[in-house]
Image: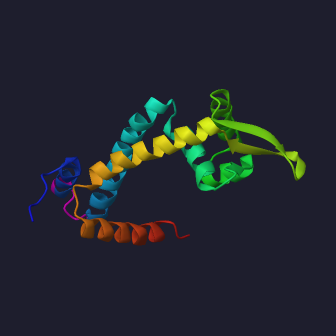
Amino acid sequence: MTTPPKDPVDAIVDQWATTRPDLDTAAMEVFGRISRIARAMGDRAERAYAPFGISRGEFDVLATLRRSGEPYSLSPRELSSTLMLTTGGMTGRLDKLERAGLLRRSPDPTDRRALRVTLTGDGLQVVDQAVAAGLAVQQGVIATLDTEKVGQLADLLRELMAGATQD
């Protein structure tokens, strides 16, 4: 197994080792790379979704509706809580997606005070194509690891996320 070339995180850790050799920078190495990977993959996802006329945030709305199963309909509150968005942020995304014909808002048949947000046929087509494009980008990057390492990495990140999300 060959060691990957040094990266920008190595340079930062080396600088700290020189100026503050008393610091344990192991966590910085992990979280610095996670942060840089997340940013790089977010940029790649944005480019993958652009041909479909949607941003990452808009993809998240469409994908949440798609994952909810038929009839691909949720309340704005359900969408907001799933996506961890304010109602104002959600309204802006819904407005744009509705103008594009990718979803529609309609009265909730069981509660006259509430709304339902539902994927349109065009929205279903766009999200299905966009998710395939986004996954292709992710798979292209993760292909640098063998299947066993991918499984190990997923397990390690799951453990790390559990520790990071505890109160």
Furthest residue toward top: 99
Residue at x 23% of width, y 60% of height: 145
> Residue 152's quadrant in the figure?
bottom left
- Colouring chosen for the image of the structure: rainbow
Residue at x 34% of width, y 55% of height: 34
For the residue pair 129 and 166, the one nearer the viewer reads as: 129
- Asked if residue 46 is among those painted magenta in the image, a careful observer would answer no
> Residue 118's quadrant in the figure?
top right
For the residue pair 151 and 166, the one nearer the viewer reads as: 151
Q: Is residue 82 above or below residue 106?
A: below
Find residue 125 and report its horizontal and vertical position in percent. Answer: 55, 40
Work out whether residue 84 can be spotted. no
Find residue 82 and report its horizontal and vertical position in percent. Answer: 63, 54
Furthest residue toward left: 2
Residue at x 63% of width, y 30% of height: 96
Residue at x 70% of width, y 51% of height: 71
Find residue 141 and report its horizontal and vertical position in percent. Answer: 28, 50
In this picture, which residue range is highlighted in magenta? Answer: 18-23
For the residue pair 19 and 105, the one nearer the viewer reads as: 105
Left or right: 90 in relation to 11:
right
**Quadrant occupied by the C terminus:** bottom right
Left or right: 25 in relation to 127:
left
**Quadrant occupied by the N terminus:** bottom left
- Magenta highlight: main SS: loop
